[in-house]
Every structure is written in C-alpha cells, then in structure tokens.
Image (tube, grey):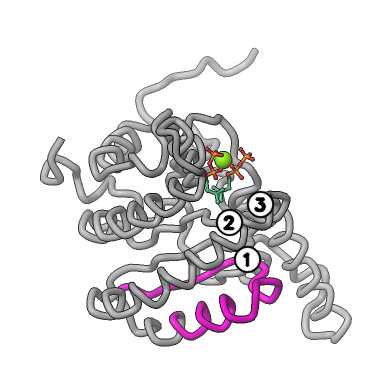
C-alpha cells in the first residue's frame, strides 16, 4: 500500500510504539543482545521520519521501562550510552526537520549526563512544530499515575486544588506530558500481547496492532500496515455507531 492510499482523515494523530524484540533479533543472528539495540536505534530514525511524513502528529516510543533496570548492568549501561549517542547525533536533524523532542518518565532518576542531554535537546528542539517525538525513558505507567497523584495531593494540601475539582482533564494535566494528544494507536513489535506498563491511562481507548517481527526489522511498510488496519477499526468509545440496531430490552 502506498502512502497516497492512506486517507489523511484516518491517520492516527498519536501513535505509541512498544519497541520490543531487539535482544531476540540479535540472538537469532548469533550476535550479542546489544547489537539488536544498536540496529533498533536506526529503526527509530527511519520510523520517526516516516511517521512525520505520513501526517502523524506525535510518536511516543517506549525506549526503557522502569522495570528494565532489572537487566544486567552491562546492558542498561549500553542503552544509556546509546541514548546519549542518539541525542548528540540526531539533534541537528531534529531541529532541521521541525521535530520537537520530548521525554516522559522518571527523568530525575536517570544518570546525570543522560538527564542533562535529554533536557538540553528538549530545549533546543522546542520550537519544532511539525512533529513531536516523545521518548519514554525510565518510564512506567504506574509510576506516572502515582506521580500525578502525588502532585495533585500536594496541590490539595497547598489549597490550590479541591479534591472535588479533580476530574479526568485535571488528572491528565498532571501526567508527564500535559499536552499529549489522545493516544490513537499502540503498536508492539516482537509478538507479545501485552502493554508491559506502557501508557496505561492513555491507552484506555487506543487501538492495538501487534506484529511478530522484531523492532530492528520494523519498516515503513509495517507502519503503513498498522495505519491501514487502524483506518478499518470502528472506534465506538462505548457508544453505538453505524447501522447496527439493537432491540431494546423488554
Ligand atoms: C526492547 O527489546 C528494548 C528494550 C526493552 C530496552 P528487548 O531488549 O526487550 O528484546 P527482547 O524482547 O529481549 O528480544
Ligand atoms: C517493554 O519491553 C519495554 C520496552 C520496549 C522499553 P520489555 O521487553 O521490557 O517487556 P516484557 O518484559 O517482555 O514485558
Ligand atoms: Mg523485550
């Protein structure tokens, strides 16, 4: 399917991707797991550019979960160095292409250098108005919800918010990216049928698309297939749509 056959009206505004399967991809080729992470970083570049070109507004990529610290130190250190390399090598291209970098997660728990560079590139790309690339780094959806509760509890104690003021909109404003557009589509590579603590609040009504292919093999063609599938989904949000008729009970 070519990009021209995708109707702009059904392009998801915000896509989240659980970039999984890097380790398996490498092991299947007799290489160490970190090789999969390195190749996966180049997939990030390709897919960011493709998503921007297709008219998606935001891509949120699950890069490192709060649970991924359970992995061997050699792997987590490699991933931190890979983030640093990505930030320094891609900053100029992001600025040139009008891409704003954003990051969500417990950024204050990241190694100092990684946190500083993330904040610096978020600032240097902040005028990008064509597309938002959001990296979920040291991100866990449960932590995000807990952190939002803490922030609102603090405001309640300070007297700037009444408990009765707290509704879904106010709560969303306390999440890591307050201006995050609604999540339309979640893609997972590597074949596992789970969310693994990714955007649990935001995924409440997102469509899901899972491929057995691993992240280093994910291509623009996969992205097009996912968007194509999204375009065929009937999103009802709990209501009744279309020509369906239901007999009323009794
Ligand atoms: C995803 O690939 C990247 C991160 C979680 C950092 P994995 O490293 O989880 O690869 P598999 O799932 O073990 O193959
Ligand atoms: C999810 O992948 C996290 C990222 C892609 C960063 P994992 O490999 O950590 O998920 P599980 O352990 O299979 O659930
Ligand atoms: Mg995995």
Q: Are marks 3 and 2 in contact (CB under 8 Å)?
A: yes
Q: Is residue 68 above or below residue 105?
A: above
Query: Observer-nearest residue: 223 or 66?
Result: 66
Residue 160's quadrant in the figure? Answer: bottom right
Question: Mark 2 near ligand 1 (CB under 8 Å)?
Answer: yes
Q: Secondary structure at mark 3?
A: helix
Residue 11 point in image, percent of width and height? 28, 49
State the SS at label 2.
Answer: strand
Mark 3 / mark 1, whichever is N-terminal: 3
The reply to whether residue 207 is in sight is: no
6 w.r.t. 175: above or below: above
Residues 44 and 162: in front is 44
Q: Residue at x 33, y 37 (%)?
A: 226
Query: Which of pointers 1 and 2 lies earlier in the amino acid sequence?
Result: 2
Task: Find disc 2 in the rendering and name its residue.
Answer: 64
Residue 195 is covered by the magenta coloring: no
The magenta-colored residue range is 99-121
As measured in the structure, the alpha-carbon distance from the residue carrying label 1 to the one carrying label 2 is 9 Å
Q: Residue at x 58, y 80 (%)?
A: 113
Q: Nearer the viewer, mark 1 or mark 2?
A: 2
Mark 3 residue crowding within 10 angstroms, few (<14) / some (14–19) / many (20+): some
- Answer with the quarter of the image where residue 38 lies: bottom left
Q: Quick one: quadrant of the C terminus? A: top right
Q: x%, y% of residue 200?
A: 63, 48
Q: Which residue is mark 1?
A: 105
| C-alpha gap between disc 3 and disc 1 | 13 Å
Residue picked out by circle 3: 68
1 over 219 or under it: above or below:
above
**Do callouts 1 and 2 mark residues in contact (Cβ within 8 Å)?**
yes
């Amino acid at each position: 399917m070519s990009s021209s056959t995708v109707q702009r009206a059904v392009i998801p505004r915000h896509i989240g991707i659980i970039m999984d399967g890097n380790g398996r991809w490498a092991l299947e080729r007799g290489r160490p797991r970190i090789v999969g992470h390195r190749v996966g970083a180049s997939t990030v570049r390709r897919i960011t550019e493709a998503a921007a070109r297709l008219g998606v507004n935001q891509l949120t990529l699950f890069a490192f979960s709060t649970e991924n610290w359970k992995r061997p130190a050699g792997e987590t250190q490699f991933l931190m160095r890979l983030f640093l390399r990505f930030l320094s090598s891609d900053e100029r291209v992001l600025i040139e292409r009008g891409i704003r970098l954003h990051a969500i997660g417990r950024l204050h728990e990241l190694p100092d250098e990684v946190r500083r560079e993330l904040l610096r590139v978020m600032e240097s790309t902040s005028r990008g108005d064509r597309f938002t690339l959001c990296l979920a780094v040291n991100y866990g959806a449960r932590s995000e919800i807990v952190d939002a509760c803490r922030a609102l509890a603090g405001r309640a104690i300070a007297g700037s918010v009444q408990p009765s003021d707290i509704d879904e909109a106010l709560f969303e404003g306390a999440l890591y990216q307050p201006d995050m557009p609604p999540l339309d589509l979640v893609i997972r590579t590597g074949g596992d049928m789970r969310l693994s603590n990714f955007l649990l609040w935001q995924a409440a009504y997102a469509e899901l698309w899972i491929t057995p292919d691993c992240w280093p093999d994910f291509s623009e063609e996969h992205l097009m297939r996912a968007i194509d599938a999204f375009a065929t989904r009937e999103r009802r949000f709990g209501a009744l749509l279309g020509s369906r008729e239901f007999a009323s009970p009794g």
